[in-house]
Image: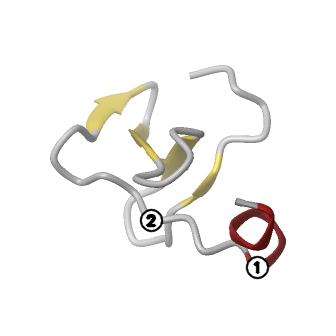
Amino acid sequence: MIFHDLFGTHTADLKTSHWSHGHFVSECTRCDKQMIKLPGQPWRLDVAGSR
């Protein structure tokens, strides 16, 4: 798990992603941290956690 956090190998679970407040929202398949994505942009961790 430490290497997962260090290298940022987070992968969004596309089966559970949904649209919320102008972002696609999902969770990482490995650590369950919340991820967000704007249309046309890559997935990233939701550091604000506000969605």
Q: Which residue is drawn at 69% across and 68% down?
A: 4
Horizontal and vertical percent position of residue 20: 38, 26
Q: Are marks 2 and 1 in contact (CB under 8 Å)?
A: no
Question: Relative to residue 48, is residue 8 depicted above or below?
Answer: below
Res 11 → quadrant: bottom left
- Please identify the residue farthest to the bottom as the structure is shown: 7
Say which of 5 and 17 sits in front: 5
Residue 34 in which image quadrant: top right
Apparent side of residue 18 relative to residue 2 in the rendered image (left or right): left
Q: Determine the secondary structure under disc 2.
A: loop
Nearer the observer, 9 or 39: 9
Residue 38: x %, y % from top left = 47, 55
Q: Distance between the residues labelled 2 and 1?
A: 12 Å
Quadrant of the rendered image containing residue 9: bottom right
Give the class, few, some or many, for how many residues have Cα within 10 Å of label 1's Cα (few <14, many ≥20). Answer: few
Disc 1 target residue: 7
Give the residue drawn at x 49%, y 70%.
41
* Amino acid marked by disc 2: Thr
Residue at the outermost left position: 15
Please provide percent x and percent y for residue 47. Answer: 78, 40
In the image, farthest residue toward the top:
50
**Where residue 30 appears, x then y in whole percent?**
48, 54
Residue under the image location 40 percent in, 71 percent down: 40
The front one of 3 and 35 is: 3
Quadrant containing the C terminus in the rendered view: top right
Tag 1, which secondary structure? helix
Relative to residue 17, is residue 50 drawn left or right?
A: right
**Location of mark 2 (residue):** 11
Which residue is nearer to you in this view: 51 or 12?
A: 12
The residue sitting at 84% across, 72% down in the picture is 6
Q: Residues within 10 Å of mark 2 (few under 14, many from 20)?
A: some
